[in-house]
Image (cartoon, rainbow, N blue to C red):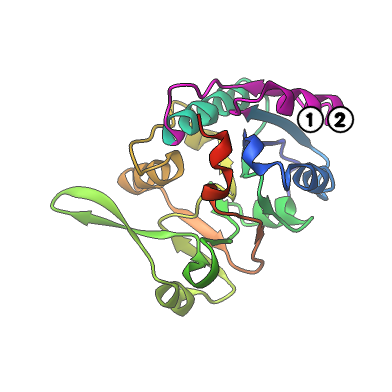
Amino acid sequence: MKDYKVFISCPINISKRYCIEDFFDNIINYNYNNLQYYFVDNSHDKWFRKNLINKYGFEIDHVNPKGKEPHEYMADSMNMCLVKFLNSDCDFWFINECDVFCDKDVINRLLSKERLIVASPYFIQLSHNSCLVGTECEKLYGNYTNRPLSWKEDFIKFNGLENKVTSAGFGAVLIHRSILEGYTFHAKENCFADTMFYMDMTHENIDVYRDESVIAEHRNISWDLNTEYKK
């Protein structure tokens, strides 16, 4: 397998302070040598970013979230990551959200699939609402729309192999440079950048794959627990 250069990047926020140091400790221990790191903080608290830079030495830029809705500043953060990636010499961008913990061999495993877009699955939502990330992209009255899958629907299709899907989230997805050249992340109310990205891929007939041999750990908590950080 070719020794590809891989860019690891994602937005971060103080609301993930409960797991961010564990996340950084995890990604620096991936069993792959040719990695570059970059992150974008969209917190109101400037000290969150500064403390992480001092401890880990990563390059971390900032997007000001003031006056913006979450879907807006998250798209802005993703676009800042995207520009940095395209200005690098990396072949792939591994979007690894800061509350998703992958196995140490995730980079080698996903690269071995030789796909332009391939992801590791993980669970979203909490308690009895928990289900594997993913939706079914459908064409309805000439327009593409995303329909959430019930946990029963997804588990019927889940077989531990590599499968074609229509969406896979941004928790742990490897994307080739050719897919992202000329692309701009965008969002709308109740529809974040990851959902729009996969709808765009469906519209362009670009295949998305999910490697179901390993499920990543998602240390998610309710956003309602972080209301003190919403300005």
Query: Which percent across, then down, holds residue 135?
Result: 39, 59
Please name the residue that numbered disc 1 is placed on. Answer: 52
> Which quarter of the figure has residue 68?
top left
Where is residue 187 drawn, in percent x and y? 38, 35
Q: Is residue 40 above or below residue 150?
A: above
The residue depicted at 60 percent of the width and 58 percent of the height is: 120
Residue shown at 43% from the left, 52% from the top: 207
For the residues labelled 2 and 1, say whether their Cβ atoms are less than 8 Å apart: yes
Helix, strand or loop for disc 2: helix
Please, what is the three-letter code of the amino acid marked with disc 1? Leu
Give the amino acid type for the residue marked by disc 2 in the picture: Lys
Side of 34 relative to 177 (left or right): right
Q: Residue at x 79, y 42 (%)?
A: 21
What residue span does the magenta drawing correspond to?
Answer: 41-70
> What is the crowding at mark 1: few (fewer than 14 residues within 10 Å), some, or many (at least 20)?
some
Count of numbered circles on the image? 2
- Element under disc 1: helix
- State the image coordinates of residue 47 (x, y, percent, origin top left): 73, 23
Task: Residue 166 in the image: state x and y as whole percent.
Answer: 40, 56
Residue under pointer 2: 55
Mark 2 and mark 1: Cα distance apart in space: 5 Å
Crowdedness near tag 2: few (<14), some (14–19) or many (≥20) residues, C-alpha within 10 Å: few
Tell me, yes or no, whether the highlighted magenta stretch contains residue 60: yes
Left or right: residue 208 compared with residue 215: left
